[in-house]
Image (cartoon, rainbow, N blue to C red):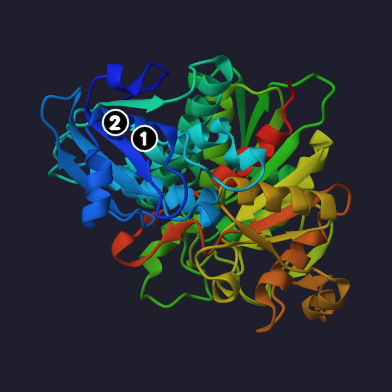
Amino acid sequence: MNFSLNSTAITSTKADCLVVALPEQGDWPASTTEADGALGGLISKLQKAGDINGKNAETIQVPLVDQPWSRLLVVGTGKDAERNSAYFRKALIAMVGTLKDGPSKSVLITLTDTKVTGNENVSSEQAKLSLIGRTLEDQLYIFSEFKSEKPTARKLNKVLVNASEAGKAQKEAFNLGLATGRGMNLARDLGNMPPNICHPSWLAERAHKLATEHDCIKTEVLDEKQMKELGMNSLLAVGQGSAQPPRLIIMEYRGGNAEDKPHVLVGKGITFDTGGISLKPGAGMDEMKYDMGGSASVFGAIQVLAETQPKINVVAVIAAAENMPDGNASRPGDIVTTMSGQTVEILNTDAEGRLVLCDALTYVKKFDPEVVIDLATLTGACIIALGHETTGLMANNDDLANELLAAGERASDKAWRLPIWDEYQSLLDSNFADMANIGGRTAGTITAACFLARFTKEYRWAHLDIAGTAWHSGKAKGSSGRPVPLLVDYLMSHAGQ
């Protein structure tokens, strides 16, 4: 697919399809008024006749004759007062849905002068260009690697996006959006891969491949022997029931000054989770291939950095293991000594994510991090609390939490903060070890984060529970690519100029 910016007059730009925005309430964008004039008032006539009303995400496509365009696609963008970035993105998704399998080979999109409410970070032309770029990439995604009959090739192969000028700021914003969409799609590819292929060693190979493709990425992989020497007995305990050995994967992107402390991302990489001896129910267990959604998002964010090369230092650490129930598997009642020296009584082998993360969170102290952000499909309780729309956020630092919440708002990839007060810590008490790995039925998402908090006291840390947002179930089953947009927005907000 060829994506590019266009800054010439709409009427001077040929394309199979012209895309314009129509608000339900509010002033027309200048581009829509210009197109209406060129078409002899066609858009006005359609609106007056009731064929179009401008309701958000409603679309209508009209054939044209003797015009620079063969078709006109009118996209409803709703009311000016309600059109925040998330609202605008719904209209963009509807637009791409109409175009992607349609007859047009080339399109000209003129939506960047549509009014979006909010601060400059979401309402500027650059912000809209970035959102358009990201939406184009992520909505055109197809995963068909294992289909014998491949989908018919799309006719659409050229997309022009109109901008006030094709200057450096506009190009960088648009390219960042496209790169973010591709990062999401990498995360989706990894998540959608079947678990007989996507295992810890395969993820390690993908990390090496990323370093081979991009000189700015350095990859290191620790095997079982190396992790044992470091005392990572908690991570190793999770993988000991599997024929697939665990791996600790480290990817470094050094784009900032040598003395700048790195932002560290830690991803849970459970490539398949049976629950171990605490076996999960069979129904829906196939979706446990998505239990490496945290690591997939880390991969996606690192790819975006490699493509755009911002001035920031980032270290990504992935704790990868497969949780299986064979004769070597960990048992409920086992006690392990973590890399930190703290002991954990394993009361439930299905609470394995925190067991791999705690050793990774201890390991990352060696990087003297600016902040540490871990991402994990950690608890079903988070889905009960926040559904599938919102990522759960917990942190030991208010400033970091607020920055991540703001990044989620800007990127339309929202998170919501939950408490990790000391009052919850007693739920993790164990009669036989320093702590148990579960805290009972109540506050499951919070006690999981409280467990991790015991390993993060020496740096600023945030935990993103993406159990409800990393993938879709049902007919639309598949990885979502979230929260790559949130991560990218956060990291770019800290990149030097």
The residues bearing labels 2 and 1 have C-alpha atoms spaced at a distance of 6 Å
- Residue 27's place in the image compared with 449, above or below, is above
Any mark on residue 33, and which?
A: 1
Any mark on residue 208, and which?
A: none
User: Looking at the rendering, which quadrant does residue 3 occupy?
Assistant: top left
Give the class, few, some or many, for how many residues have Cα within 10 Å of label 2's Cα (few <14, many ≥20): some
**Residue 226 shows in this picture:** no
For label 2, the SS is helix
For label 1, the SS is helix
- Residue 162's place in the image compared with 94, above or below, is above
Residue 461 vs residue 218, the one in the foreground: 461
Give the class, few, some or many, for how many residues have Cα within 10 Å of label 1's Cα (few <14, many ≥20): some
* Quadrant location of the N terminus in the rendered image: top left
Instruction: Say whether residue 416 is left or right of residue 91.
Output: right
| Residue 414, percent from left and from top | 59, 56
Determine contact: label 2, label 1, CB under 8 Å.
yes
* Quadrant location of the C terminus in the rendered image: top right
Residue at 39% over, 32% down: 31
**Residue 101 shows in this picture:** yes
- Residue 342's place in the image compared with 102, above or below, is below
User: Looking at the rendering, which quadrant does residue 344 occupy?
Assistant: bottom right
| Residue 288, percent from left and from top | 44, 62
